[in-house]
Image (spheres, coloured by chain):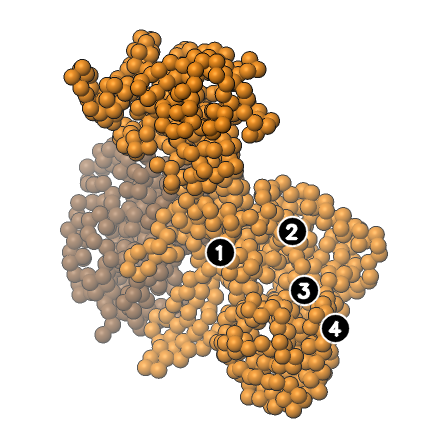
Chain colours: A orange, B brown
Amino acid sequence: MPENSVLIVDSDPASRETAAWLKGAGFKVATAATGEEALSLIDNQDFSVMLLDMRLPGKHGLGVLREVKVKRPWLQAIVTTDHPSVESATEALKQGAVDYLVKPFSPQDLEKLVKDTIKSASKQKTVHVQIKAKQTPARISYQATFVISRDSLKNLVNSLIKEREAIGVRARQGKFAYDKVKNFDDLALDYDVTVNPPTAFFIPACETILRYKLGPTPEITPVTDTTPRVLIGVHPDDINAINLLDEVFMTGNPDPNYAARRQNTLIIGVDVLTPLPSSFAPSMGSYTAESGYDLLLTDIGNSSYMVTVGSEAGAQVLAKYAQVREPTVAETARQKQVRDEALSKYRLFLDMSRDKIPNLLENNYDNPYWKMRSETCLNCGSCIMVCPTCFCFDVQDDVSLNLTDGERIRKPDGCMLVDFSRVAAGANFRGDKVSRFRHRMYHKGKYILDRYGKFGCVGCGRCSVTCLAEIASPLEAYNAIAASETAREKARRTITNTRPQPELYLPHLASIVKTTPLSSRESLFEFRLKDGHKLGHRPGQFVEVYVFGIGESPISLTSSPTRDHTFEVAVRNVGNVTGALHRMEAGAPVGIRGPFGNGFPLEQMEGKDLLFIAGGIGIFPLRSLIQYVLDKRENYGKINLLFGARSPAERVFAGEMAEWSKAPDVNFMETVDKGDESWTGNVGVITTLIPKVQFDPKKTVAVVVGPPIMYRFVINELKKRDLADDNIIVSLERKMKCGVGKCGNCQINGVYVCQEGPVFSLTRLRTLREAI
Amino acid sequence: MKPKVAFFDFTSCEGCQLDALNLDVGEVLGLLGAVEIVNFREVKTDRSDDYDIAFIEGSITKESEIPRIEAIRKQAKVLVALGACACTGGVNCLKNAYKPDELLKGVYGECASYYNTILARPVSAVVPVDAYIRGCPPTTSEFLKVVKAALLGKRPDIPNYPVCTECRIAGNVCVFQRGGTCIGPVTRAGCDALCVSSGRFCWGCRGLVDDPNTNSAKDVLARYGLTLDQILERFKIYNSYSEVSQCQK
């Protein structure tokens, strides 16, 4: 990086003289007249120091600074201005400027400052804000805290009331509200919350922004209100709200009307002693305020207050109207104690760090919560009208009756009102309750943050007090969304492996008790663990069957745990492991790992009617469930069993099925895709059976197991019969090498079938695009 | 050529007409400078049937009022419903809950037969209405707003949000929080929450907003201890003509 290159960004031609002078002093100098020009220069060239004027045509100096700091964080920026203010100085330093220089300055001073800046580029910023002015350099030490007696405070406030319009907190109809005050004794300094936000004095209910005369050559005059005001008793959360509005209205293209009010208003803050029960300011980080006030009071008892100076103007009025002294150690401790006591009274908290909110919202745009909660919304606008961070507005014209002159006025408006997003042609871009409700929550928790770096909610709790439908609290929304996400996560992670796996990859020794051929390709194997224990499985789970020297295969358990100490698996001879298994005889040793995965939702099925649908060897896993249910027949309602095979020769467990159908209240239906001369039953794919079955969709759980191709068609048929997604259960097949969510073969999107499956509800499947 | 304006009264207390003239001197002069009033029973005796804009006060409650309003509609280029009775039927519609004979007897006793009455209804139930100036009575500012909009040929900015919005802007403590009940949450704003700001509650005189969530309002009122009948009584004061049927579901 060039050691002595300076970029001067200034629209004033006088800056060219500065440039010439710096060049003479040995610096390399470039100039830019606008922020846009400066930004494009910076894109192509490195500078060590930038002199940046605040008032530029187009993009405001602070906006340029912000972008520069993103692009070139190391670039040392000195902000220069003709219009110094503590607010802009603070803002500039906050944005990362190293100094704040008031014009005009002497060439010698500038040269020294630029040299010093380059030299100390690596050093830390001072904590003091220094405004370099021509005549009297004022050194303001922020956060200096003094003790002020109540009498002296009264004198201060009453003096301010005489010199400016005073707005303070007063009791109103059993609550508190900001209102004009005429005397210190009218003021409430210990209150929970005001019904109206203090920001209403910066964006008033009805504000004239322009006056005009109509005619062939209209005349337009801007109107700004420069009445000196003082706001007394503003809570830290509201001060933080004002800081956000400053960000919105005073950076980039500053809003002249807001800026005029803001710059002519003194803010005297007061720490909260009695928080509102619905406030969650600590969770939003706005329980204390670091800046944004001129003076901040803390009631430390004994008719004394701590007063913290937040600005030059604050220091001046304090010096002019009050007597203060340095606090004792005990008083400083008392201030901390008062704040801690108040903090301990808050009752509502975010269930997560607030930093998580934007991401949470990002992922939950379609969360059913929005619809569910917004249904009772009255669109009454109360929540946005009491909100200290809501700033949207409408602009209307009011013309005189003789149509010769008029004014433009702005009024508060906001996203919760029906017509806020309606355009003249009639379209309404947020025409339903859900989108309005959701927009507000996103605006508070994400959009504002993305744009201005601050949350659009300070947790004051006013909206939840005022909302008659009791739906307005962002805290409740964010917590509920987070909870639903946790629940979803939990559902995703429900793992019902019942047997511990101390040595994950070490198979338990088992031996074949019996083999029974089921068809030309399939046999049933009965195993017993060497240690004599039960396997301890649930219907629907699987085991990894290991044929020594050949390999492992995931195989569904075919028998119910209610039957015996042994367990059965039915296996089709299709590969290495299954082929080897088919060659083995009774007594031969095998390795068993598992059981793995989750099983069928037995508890959900209890008391319900059941509809079992098996396609081909889908009957294998289903058999464990059917046996289980028949063994606990009294726990379940009516049973329908549908079975489809490709041909009569491929009907496995046909004999058993005939047995099952004799149990009370069991209806068995069977079909084959293609019949032969011996077949007299149904012919057709399994979906053709579904319309023939009688069942009550409200009382029925359907369990579907079969080849992948079958699922989509069967599910379609079931949806036609109005079965809810939650009550459609399927078991999926995947390649599962490890069985415990490590090897990754079985993943569907982010889900491991071996752990979170193989049994899934359709509700869950709908979130997995790769599933079927 | 100044537009010619006429005022007509139907069944009403005529308070809206008086209130329309409740302007300060400057405004009256401004109005008279902008329009020519050709027909206004409360103000002048001369009458003319040549007018452009007709302001209609009151609801339609007698057979004889129907041909009269139809004739006015035919003449007027712009027909404006002025006040709650003309806009929503207003309190007159409360009589619709009774049998006409019983009602007449109850009110006029032996003289009942001298009168005839039909179901009370807003003007829009009989003839098309171009603009509404709502309220019982309407605010003079809204009256002027509509007049000015008509003169400029634009649509006036009449709020389509509930009274709560303006009530919060006014910094009022919610009536519900003060232990009362209010139908502001479904009532169209535009009055700057006048009644609540004066310590009362909203009666709903400006009619319901376009899309009132009456079910939710009902739940809210019920949560604050009102029975369905009590809730409907509140709604019915000004909104019994049509809108109330929605919340009886």
Residue topped by disc 4: A139
Q: Does dot 4 land on a helix, a strand or a loop?
A: strand
- CA distance separating discs 3 and 2: 17 Å
Name the residue: 40% across, 20% down. Answer: A583
Residue topped by disc 3: A294
Q: Does dot 2 land on a helix, a strand or a loop?
A: loop
Q: Output the chain of dot 4.
A: A
Q: Are marks 2 and 4 on the same chain?
A: yes
Residue flagged by tag 2: what amino acid is it? Answer: Tyr
Residue A506 position in % (x across, y down) = 56, 27
Q: Quadrant of the C terminus of chain A?
A: top left
Answer with mark 1 or mark 4, whichever residue precedes in sequence.
4
Query: Considering depth in this image, is A635 or A314 the residue closer to the camera?
Result: A635
**B72 to A621, vertically: above or below:** below
Residue flagged by tag 3: what amino acid is it? Answer: Asp
Residue flagged by tag 1: what amino acid is it? Answer: Tyr
